Amino acid sequence: MFLLGLQKKIMNNKTFMMIKPDAVERGLIGKILADITDAGFKIIELKMVKLSLDDAKRFYKIHEDRPFFDDLTTYMSRSPIVAAVLSKDNAVDEFRKLIGSTDPNEADNGTIRKKYALSKGENSVHGSDSNENAEIESNFHFS
Ligand code: DAT
Ligand code: MG
């Protein structure tokens, strides 16, 4: 039982995040990273990179049939992003709580999206939605 618990804890302890173009453009990298480390996350990988339109389309492939796909991929490739792998117990859920709802108008007070996001489309940060996607998205950026 102890080993199973430990294994679960290790499998739940990482997530992947990006600081998106709208936030990088407005000089918010430092503030957002401070919010993240203040919330108890450790930064274990970090880089700033400009995605090509093709990179953005591959990263967001699950949304390719959605009406906002072109806007999303054009926006994500218009200027650099910051990509990071973070660790904390229950990292995926804890990080989604820290960033808040997709639409900043629906996000709770104190969340990163409530504080910084411009709109549902330009919402300043990405956070993986499952352990499986955290692994896939981390490998996309840090292979
Ligand atoms: P999240 O980023 O909260 O996981 P998502 O995975 O549903 O949200 O969508 C990915 C991104 O696509 C989201 O951060 C912003 C954009 N997006 C989602 N729904 C949208 C909409 N209705 N209009 C415009 N952009 C949208
Ligand atoms: Mg998502």
Image (tube, rainbow, N blue to C red):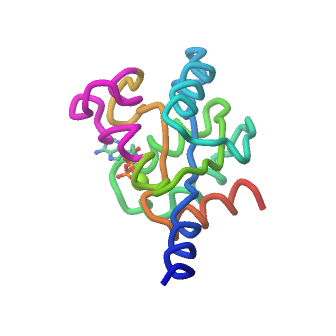
The residue positioned farthest toward the top in the image shown: 27
Q: Judge from the rendering whether residue 122 lies leftward or rightward of residue 55; answer left or right.
A: left
Magenta-highlighted residues: 96-115
Where is residue 28? Give x, y as percent: 56, 19
The x, y position of residue 49, in whole percent, is 74, 38
Which residue is the extreme one toward the right? 143
The quadrant of the picture occupied by the C terminus is: bottom right
Q: At 32% across and 35% down in the image, what residue appears? A: 120
Q: How many marks?
A: 0
Residue in front for this viewpoint, 91 or 100? 91
Between 101 and 110, the one lying in front of the other is: 110
In reply to whether residue 102 is colored magenta, the answer given is yes
Q: Is residue 92 above or below residue 119?
A: below
- Residue 98 painted magenta: yes
Of 80 and 69, the residue lying toward us: 80
Left or right placement of residue 127 versus residue 98 in this view = right
User: Would residue 109 appear left or right of 74 to someone viewing this image?
Assistant: left
